[in-house]
Amino acid sequence: MSTVTWITARGLFGRARFLMLLPLPLVLIGLAVLCRSLGVDPGQWGPPVLVGLGLAVVLPVVALIVGTGVLGAEIDDGTVVHILTKPLPRWQIVLPKLAVAAGVSAVTVGVPLYVAGVLADSVRLGLALVAASAAGALAYSALFLALSLVTRRPVLLGLVYVLIWEGLLGRFVDGTKVLSIQQWVIALADRIAPTPLLGTTVSVPVAAVLTALVAVGFTLLAIDRLRSFSVAGETS
Amino acid sequence: MSEATGVIHDIGYQRYTGPRLARRQVFGALYGHGVRTVFGFGRSAKAKIFPWLVVAVVTVVAAGVTAVRSQIGEVVLTYAQFADAMSWLVIFFAAVAAPELVSRDLRSGVLPLYFSRPLPRGDYALAKLLALVTSLWLLLGGPQLVMFLGAAFTTDRGLRGVWDELLDLLPGLLYAGLWAVVFASIALLVASLTGKRAFAAGGIVAVFLMTTPVVGVLSILPSRTVNELAFLAAPSSLVSGVGTWALGDRLTQGQEGGIPIGDFGPVYAVVAVLLVAACVSLLLLRYRKVAAR
């Protein structure tokens, strides 16, 4: 484990504000347990909990907070200079940070989704959701990590993508679903464990290719942007 | 001991004897500055991007709705439904504005400077809250005014039509005010907890988004009472519930709409008041003691 990984992990977990992330997965598990114990038909509570809460809210929001936090927090503090002045190739800075961000998001989201998936249908659905959300976490993390290098306001731009592109437009304009990580995750999970609970218009090969493309492309963009990075003060 | 030879010259330092502005002016200045901050006036172009992006989108939607109505004569969205339809943008706007108002002051550690003026602790929080409420209300009310003007100028029933339209507009503006108060108090409370704008924005969105699917789940549980009380769980549906109860038909103007809250309308109103009161008192409590840094 490289020092950068270690610093990043400590920067994430060493603060009390990491606890702010916990309510999201807990609500997801709580709702799944509540519905299961009251004997509601999984066909009814599955879509709102698994997709509406899990894949559409918890996954992007956790990935957004973590993904922009791993590098963005250091850029805000100005402490990123300490890493940048070390004789490290840029990819050795970006990749460990991306790994930590994707790993933390995948675990935070995967565990509750697994529980909810098992309660809703089967262990297979649970594992499918874990695998798909891990892929989604990687794609989201790469996107948000690159955003935190491209702009000074990565969280707000990320929110524009999550809220307006995936949330608002994805609901009204069907065509935008092709370019939505959320829909790719649903497509992948549905492919691994076909159930009537998950449904999307995006085809599986398209989803798989685009997920990989986003993950790799934005990682390369981040590495490239870090090559010529200028440290500036906080925006006014 | 030798005699003192130094001389103290009177170089004309004077005390300020003019009128001193009091608490009200401090409050007013803080409020005015707050509203300007939200919309990015007096700040760099970068600070204007996000607020004005949202303003542009809601205005375009309002203009589109007005155009459809004047051409086809079909009411796509009533004034109150407009606020409901824009809820995601309101959440985003609150996530942009609230951290700008309070988190920056926390981060740069200027609160001790503020509180060394004749400014009670509560006034700071209330001025910021009022600024955010005003901004959110303007965000929702402005497009409604656009819709009203469009409808008023294309009405074919003369002044009578304009008057009817005005009677429809006023409850809509009132309803927008309710949205503004509920959303502003929650958003500002969340933002006041952290000095990092990024985390504050994420937290606000998490609070609002996380609660919405809870409503969806509660409303399919096998109990009618729970179903009708389910909309209490999320701020946006809570506001819709109060609107359905208080404004009734005027909210939807005979169209399909409104949410099934049964006979629990007063409960929704009480919960909304309690929620706002709780958020404001927690906000005041949070500013009882501030760290210098």
Image: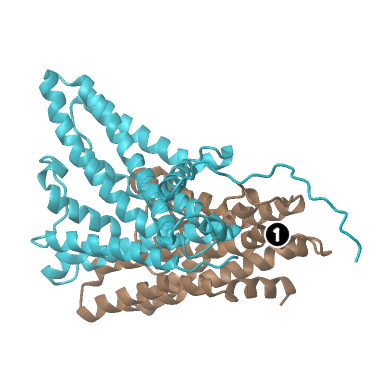
Chain colours: A brown, B cyan
Whole-percent x, y for residue B138 in the image:
35, 40
| Visible residue check, residue B83 | yes
Q: Mark 1 falls within which chain?
A: A
Q: Quadrant of residue A77?
A: bottom right
Q: Which residue is mark 1?
A: A78
Left or right of B262? Residue A215 is right
Residue visible at 13% across and 51% down? B246
Left or right of A48? Residue B21 is right
Towards the viewer: A15 or A40 = A15
Towards the viewer: A99 or B85 = B85
Q: Is residue B155 above or below residue B101?
A: above
Dot 1: within a 10 Å radius of its alpha carbon, few (fewer than 14), some, or many (20 or more) residues?
some
Identify the secondary structure beneath mark 1. loop
Left or right of A114? Residue B223 is left
Image quarter where the N terminus of chain B lies is bottom right
Whole-percent x, y for residue B115 in the image:
51, 59
Residue visible at 52% across and 72% down? A18
Task: Kindly identify the amino acid type of the residue bearing the numbered disc 1.
Answer: Gly
Q: Is residue A193 above or below residue A218?
A: below
Whole-percent x, y for residue B192 in the image:
46, 61
Instruction: Pick out the residue farthest to the right.
Output: B2
Q: Is residue A95 above or below residue B243?
A: below
